[in-house]
Amino acid sequence: MEFELEWKNEYSIGIEEIDIQHRKMLAMIKKIYNLADNSFGKSDIEQLISELIKIIHEHFTCEEELMRKYNYPEVNKQIYEHHLISEKMQQQINEVKKDQYHDNKYDKEFGKFVLRKLEI
């Protein structure tokens, strides 16, 4: 079953750079989800997940820099949330690398987890 979530204008936060990053992350999540659904190889999924992790970390860095630049009062809370998301993603990557119950369900759970954190 193909992942159907599409970008909607209501997801926009009004900062073009951040909105572009969110679209890019959504596209990557869809790609991972759809590959997992079609039983592609573990190495293909791992490579895409690694790319997604890189994109997410770049996004977090950009977001935090903007928050600091404009003295956003909740910056520390957001940085902490980014830290928690990064930790959880790394735990899930480690599980995939250990090949513990690696199946489509796990990859789909990862995609859903990231989407929840992006609040899409």
Image: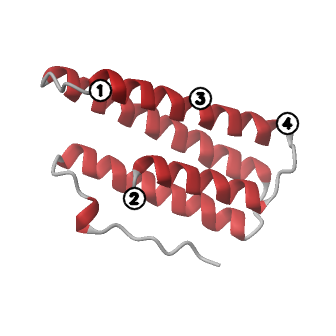
- Quote the CA–CA distance across marks 4 and 2: 30 Å
Callout 3 amino acid: Glu
Identify the colour scheme used: secondary structure
- Quote the CA–CA distance across marks 1 and 3: 17 Å
Tell me if residue 23 comes above or below residue 99 in the rendering.
below
Q: At x 45% / y 39%, what residue is drawn?
A: 56
Q: Nearer the viewer, mark 4 or mark 2?
A: 2
Residue 94 screen position, x and y as percent: 75, 33
Give the residue pinned by disc 3. Answer: 87
Q: Earlier in the sequence, mark 1 or mark 4?
A: 1
Give the residue pinned by disc 1. Answer: 64
**Residue 83, numbered label:** none
Q: Earlier in the sequence, mark 1 or mark 3?
A: 1
At label 3, counting other C-alpha atoms closer than 10 Å, the crowd grade (few under 14, some 14-19, many 20 or more) is few
Give the residue pinned by disc 2. Answer: 120
Callout 1 amino acid: Glu
For numbered disc 1, what is the local secondary structure?
helix
Q: Taking 103 as reference, is 9 left or right? A: left
